[in-house]
Amino acid sequence: MDKYEKVIELAKRRGFLWNSFELYGGAAGFYDYGPLGSTLKRRIEHIWRELYVIHEGLMEIETPTIGIEEVFVASGHVGGFSDPLCECKKCGEAFRADHLVDDIVEVADALSNTELDALIRNNDIKCPECGGDLGDAYEFNLMFRTAIGPGSGRAGYMRPETAQGMFVNFQRLLKFYRDKLPFGATQIGKSYRNEISPRQGVIRLREFTQAEAEIFIDPRDKTHPNFERFAGTVLNLYSEHGQEHGTTLQVTIGDAVKQGIIAHEFLAYHIALTNHFLRRVGISPDHLRFRQHKKNEMAHYAIDCWDAEIKTDRFGWIEVVGIADRTDFDLNAHAKTSKTELSVYIEYDEPEMVTSFVVKPEMGKLGPAFKGKAKDVADALKAMTREELEQDGITVVVDGEEFIVSPGLVKFTEETVKVSGETVVPHVIEPSFGIDRILYCTMEHAFNEEMVAVHEGRDGKESKDPKEESRIVFKLQSEVAPVQVAVLPLMTKSELIGPANKIVALVRDKGLLVSYDDSGTIGRRYRRNDEIGTPYSITIDYESLDDRSVTIRDRDSMDQVRTPIEGIEDLIYELVYGGREFKTAGTPV
Amino acid sequence: MDKYEKVIELAKRRGFLWNSFELYGGAAGFYDYGPLGSTLKRRIEHIWRELYVIHEGLMEIETPTIGIEEVFVASGHVGGFSDPLCECKKCGEAFRADHLVDDIVEVADALSNTELDALIRNNDIKCPECGGDLGDAYEFNLMFRTAIGPGSGRAGYMRPETAQGMFVNFQRLLKFYRDKLPFGATQIGKSYRNEISPRQGVIRLREFTQAEAEIFIDPRDKTHPNFERFAGTVLNLYSEHGQEHGTTLQVTIGDAVKQGIIAHEFLAYHIALTNHFLRRVGISPDHLRFRQHKKNEMAHYAIDCWDAEIKTDRFGWIEVVGIADRTDFDLNAHAKTSKTELSVYIEYDEPEMVTSFVVKPEMGKLGPAFKGKAKDVADALKAMTREELEQDGITVVVDGEEFIVSPGLVKFTEETVKVSGETVVPHVIEPSFGIDRILYCTMEHAFNEEMVAVHEGRDGKESKDPKEESRIVFKLQSEVAPVQVAVLPLMTKSELIGPANKIVALVRDKGLLVSYDDSGTIGRRYRRNDEIGTPYSITIDYESLDDRSVTIRDRDSMDQVRTPIEGIEDLIYELVYGGREFKTAGTPV
């Protein structure tokens, strides 16, 4: 079993992840979150909201998952959101054409369908399922299509990203933020991608959860007001240049901007914030890097793009977040398709004095002189330069006819006017998170199998003869663990159950995720909680009834301390959220 | 403008609700939640999770919104989830056939398509759009259909309810809860209904959010362990009997069960919990009733169903929650379709002694007597009763041939064996919440227009001559308000902005939703916060710099108190969550 298999086995057994529709044989590309997986996901989303919505002030919105065709025509998804599909002429099985030539060329996904066909023919590639001949590659649109309303209905698509919901609401959002840049909105929700043939389990889903922010900024100023917060943060940067040499750079965010590795402060700030988030939910820093998109893989309109990539045991480095400067592409696309101006009027801090040359034909004199042509002559004069107008006899051409205007019939002057602002189309900075992949990676990075000395017999009593045993432990961050504290009466006796339930209530009222478990030996319950990643377990024993104290066990060290029941909820809270060290939590047992 | 229009106008203007895809002319049946609406929705969902997931222990799961066909064949949605559709022969517009005859008959939705056609013809009903002739009514399936994978793909549907995700995971859940009834799971997520022609704004959506619990209980015992908690709660019950007479009963939950109005304790507990939830999010008790389904509207398998209905200004009483005892229907349906046993083995508290009659043919003697037929004779004997076996000569028929068995060749006896349990198919109690409708109703019930005396001039200074002005105020519960406290420096001056931002940070770290607002006069900012339902506003003025105190304004009474900055975060927290009375918050101003 490789690590992926081990993690998924545990995840299924303990209620984190289940294959969807298993009762009916399942369907590739769909996974269910069981009780613990769903809670873990809520915790990860909660931290994302805290960072992006509360602290960055990027308010959350919620738009439908079904979209009308116009939106995805404008966004380019109807035209271009596709993968090359290749079907077996014999068994009818469908394949990603680029995946079939993966081993032969380096950037298979950059090839045209004609190039793919040629490679398949020249290398005599056959159907991996039945060995039959393969048909020509063609583009398969990856949006799930449906119809809205009765009859053939109006074309609708399951959204391939949440981002378009923010773009089409640009005007509403601009008004909400009282016409001031920068501003932004976020969305956490389902997106869909009708994969041709998903074969990577929970890594490639047809229905997945995105957390996206679209931040509208002033295109003339891409500094970030809080850049200093992260300027000293060191990241693993796998830049375009580095990729040519296979080298990852360890550099501060501040230096990366100074050296022009990252395009500008605003993007760099969001790369660093992404790092902060991923670390906080439990991604190991040595399995995390930021990879810059190469010029040839980046969308033509984008200025700079970086992916957060996490190293996994089976799939290698996988992309979990994209952070891009999308420029004004999306707003311009929707402006054009909807025939609506999507821009911001930005007032200057100080009005600017702008000097311009103004021509004032004297209509009272031009009229009698040129009759019906006076208006045309005046317009022609207005378009002239100072030099032309300073001639003695000014020659004007109207409809191919020449007129001579004497200097007294036209005045010209330089005028200085106050301009107080200008209209700009904002640029968009987009951090886009794949929550399901991040969740899987937190599990893989937290997964540990270790040999430990067990001092406790199967009966739950201390054994004189400790023995080595292997244990599986999910070392999840306390903050994201679906059970943060387990309360365990040593025996299933009412005199212990009562006080245990009181502790459950105390800790729960503090907002912590708590479970009560009285089934099986204490050792077995510790193992069970190790497997689901419960950082702390509280055991109530007969001594507790006398001395009003309990034992707390630390998941990672398996150390135990004795501590009073009084104030236990605050103690656990500090252990989980306050960074309090376990060894300060009581008297070692 | 009726109240619906007023609420929606405010909701649009202030960023609660927006028409989806407005940039492209919109689409009926879809709404966006703006920044404040989305936050309000998260707050409502948060309270639901606290009650159902944390306190009831019904763990949340998350299953895909796209479902495979097998699931919805078993659930009956492929066959029966439809509305009668009627199209205009001239303009092609589609209508709900039952809605066309709404004014003519009382229970239009109970009519067959033939009955609807007859009514439409006999009453000469024409197309409401163009006056054209209407075609025959036919059933239109309300699930959005799509295809999973390439080619014609595998049929998929957008789920019409979250419930099926729990049912198909019954076995996984049973194992998670260690094979003990009752247990349950919940889901908060999107569901879909491809309405023929939705015309009721946010009340009838094609994509909506459900919060559902499926609780699996022992069919032999429908008492509830915590029933006492709600036994004394008085509810407005609009029972089947009451509906015949148009009377609503005010009765305690305990009496309703005793008198047989509500079928049993478990259902009654969940009706009361629904009431508790709706009250907590801000539904007025006098606009809330529970309506029992009539026998003829209830699904044939259900034992008892109640809808929570809320009174709205435009639409009258609308259903927002359904609470049903669905019996073993869903599990049996999936068991049959999937050919899998979906049941629980329940161990008795005490093993039962069960006595049965056992026949023991003596094979050693039957063999020689009946040769090749001995086995068949023995089987025939085993199926006989004591009376038959007590005959002198026992007649046995095998393959139409008669055999006489003498009494010495068969023994029979009564045996008593210990039976320690039995296998049952659990019944399901389902509370199903429509979150979007509930959210709209909290807004409608919170919406107030009132005349108030304004003591403050347009310049923000106190005016000697108070005048009457109308104000709009959203009296949302503090707990659900999208902004719980606004921090307002009296003037946009750095010496006030600094301390204001410090208060923002303090209050935010306490987990409260806080906004900072320094634009416009203080009076205008109070109005703006009244309109979005901010319960408390903190004003920092020049005095604050000297006396380290601030003014807090109460939204509903518009009273103001002066209170120290020190500890302000705890004070606001108690006002919002602790039920602390505003008048105790400081010195009246």
Image (cartoon, coloured by chain):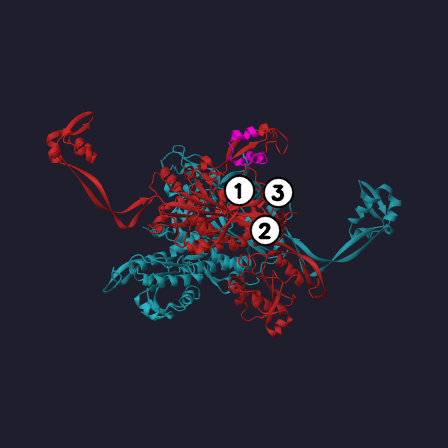
Chain colours: A cyan, B red
Q: CA distance from mark 3 to mark 2?
A: 26 Å
Examine the rendered structure and indicate whether residue A565 appears above or below residue B232: below
Residue lying furthest right: A368
Disc 1 residue type (three-letter)? His
Tell me if mark 2 has few (under 14), some (14-19) or many (20+) residues whose alpha carbon lies within 10 angstroms of its own. Answer: many
Q: Secondary structure at mark 3?
A: loop
Mark 1 or mark 3, earlier in chain: 3
Q: CA distance from mark 1 to mark 3?
A: 46 Å
Mark 2 sits on what residue?
B444
From where the camera sits, is residue B176 visible? yes
Mark in front: 1 vs 2 = 1
Disc 2 residue type (three-letter)? Glu
Q: Is residue B302 left or right of residue A371?
A: left
What's drawn in magenta, residue-wise?
Answer: B94-119
B129 drawn magenta: no
* Pick the front one: A124 or A338: A338
Name the disc covering residue B245, or none: 1
Q: CA distance from mark 1 to mark 2?
A: 29 Å
Mark 3 sits on what residue?
B25
Q: Chain of mark 1?
A: B
From where the camera sits, is residue A324 visible? no
